[in-house]
Image (cartoon, rainbow, N blue to C red):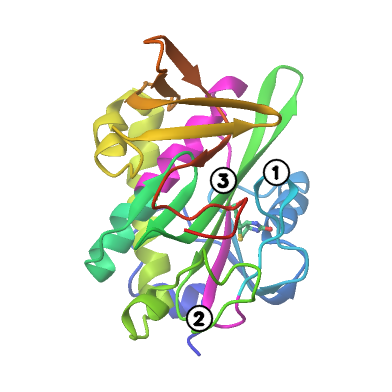
Amino acid sequence: MEKLTLDDIKEYLETKYIGRDIIYLDTTTSTNDIVKEMAEKGASEGLIVIAEEQIKGRGRMGRRWITGKGKALAVSILLKPDIKPDICPSITSLIALSAVKAIRKATNYDIMIKWPNDLVLNNRKLGGILTEMSMEGIKVKYIIIGLGLNINQEVFDDDIKNIAVSLKSFSGKNFDRRIILSEILNYFESDYENFKRYGLEYFVEDIKRYSIIFGKDISVIDGNKIVNGKVVDIDKEGGLILKTSEGELRKIISGDVIMEGLYNIYTNKI
Ligand code: BTN
């Protein structure tokens, strides 16, 4: 099993500050929690924490996240951008795009984004993103981006086996996690720099191009609300614009997407 320390990845890493400080752990609770701890102690922007196993790996909406030991990627990045809290969800769309470009480059597979924060391969879930932020007054103190990616797992637990995919389960091939990780960090640093300069607007065309739900009829579930419609746009903040059957335009900023032919976390089926 390849390790993921800075020494192990530095030959592939082209960044200036993202991933130049790496905490690499065998086992931890959740890499997001370790980044939080370090941020509270004053760690600098760009710190990343990687773990081979997470005992309390977290997904969105309080779900759990399993990381196949030595076979997957569980990484969290510390960011300290000078942005307003309402811009934070854009960071999720941004890293989703960077990761898609990076994994496409490393594999040539047709990786897509399932809004807002899933990576999809072959209509199944390849990875997910959990962005968390800490505030100081009305300002963003720091942001933690957690990325979980299925790479070399061959089997999945029963509760996710119908919805999850790894690069290996799709192709039968093993992938070098050092290269995948480095490519993601390389793309992300350059995208993050442009994001700070130009905002998410700069990336919206690419986000639409790689969106598996763009132009499709979907349902979005947010708590106990459900909205049905066709995805007609993704706006410059990363929000979904749905056209309902009554012809009304609705902007959606969060929720789980249900689409025919795509994995469904509520039924555990395609
Ligand atoms: C989701 O799809 O619901 C998001 C999954 C995010 C998982 C990653 S793995 C690294 C980081 N640490 C965590 O506890 N969660 C994120």
Please tell me whether mark 1 or mark 3 is closer to you in this view.
1
Q: Is residue 266 left or right of residue 233?
A: right
What residue did someone put label 2 on? 153
Check mark 1 vs ligand 1: CB closer than 8 Å? yes or no: yes
Q: CA distance from mark 1 to mark 3?
A: 26 Å
Which stretch did the figure color magenta?
68-97
Q: CA distance from mark 2 to mark 1?
A: 24 Å
Q: Residue at x 72, y 61 (%)?
A: 30
Which is more N-terminal, label 1 or label 2? 1
Q: Nearer the viewer, residue 160 or 181?
A: 160
Residue 81 sits inside the magenta stretch: yes
Give residue 156's quadrant in the image.
Answer: bottom right
Q: Nearer the viewer, residue 73 or 111?
A: 111
What residue did someone put label 1 on? 61
Under circle 1, the secondary element is helix
Q: Is residue 84 visible?
A: no
